[in-house]
Image (cartoon, rainbow, N blue to C red):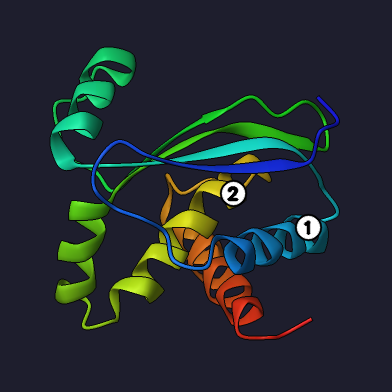
Amino acid sequence: MNEEIINFYSENNFNLEDETRHEDWLKRVISSEDKKLGEISFIFCDDEYLLEINRKYLDHDTYTDIISFDDSVGDILGGDIFISTQRVEENAGKFSVEFSEELKRVMVHGVLHFCGYKDKTAEEKKLMRSKEEEKMQMFHVEQ
């Protein structure tokens, strides 16, 4: 698992614009947490697709914007991150942010989970949110 690959797949009609830029950004995020990239796959899908995964694997009967399956080993990050682009679009409207910004937040949220950050308690959520903000700023910094 020393491949250093970020994959982008789509189970709906969504296409990530500028995949290379997103990939470079996520690699910098991983590096900034003193972790290494193994293989991470982002799977973009719709609400129903993600709801089915939520029911099948997590026994939750709710819509969500992201589900991540962590296959990291030590400091080498790997796994699958499923993102509902429908939910991201709805949340972007709710939070009055651009779709692209909300998408980056959700993408980096999944990667931060792989880095060991949790978001169950209020304290964990606060740290996760500040890490998301910090890492999203890195997207706008050209290397």
- Residue ranking furthest to the top: 56
Q: Residue at x 68, y 46 (%)?
A: 115
Q: Quick check: 88 above or below 3?
A: below
Residue located beneath label 1 in the image: 33
Residue 42 horizontal/vertical position (percent) = 48, 42
Q: Quick check: 71 above or below 28?
A: above
Q: Is residue 11 left or right of residue 139?
A: left
Residue located beneath label 2 in the image: 111
Q: Residue at x 52, y 68 (%)?
A: 18
Determine the secondary structure under disc 2.
Answer: helix
Which corner quadrant holds the N terminus?
top right
Whole-number angstrom distance, CA of label 2 to CA of label 1: 10 Å
Mark 2: few, some, or many residues within 10 Å (few <14, many ≥20)?
many
Q: Is residue 129 left or right of residue 45?
A: right
Q: Is residue 100 left or right of residue 139?
A: left
Mark 1: few, some, or many residues within 10 Å (few <14, many ≥20)?
few
Residue 69 horizontal/vertical position (percent) = 50, 28
The amino acid on which the numbered mark 2 sits, given as a three-letter code, is Val
Judging depth in this view, the residue of 20 and 43 nearest the camera is 20
Q: Do residues under tags 2 and 1 come within 8 Å of each other at their CB atoms?
A: no
Q: Residue at x 26, y 59 (%)?
A: 88
Judging depth in this view, the residue of 46 and 51 nearest the camera is 46
Residue 35 horizontal/vertical position (percent) = 82, 48
Q: Which mark is residue 63?
A: none
Which corner quadrant holds the C terminus?
bottom right
Q: In terms of image quadrants, where is residue 105?
A: bottom left
Q: Is residue 142 left or right of residue 58?
A: right
Q: In terms of image quadrants, where is residue 58?
A: top left
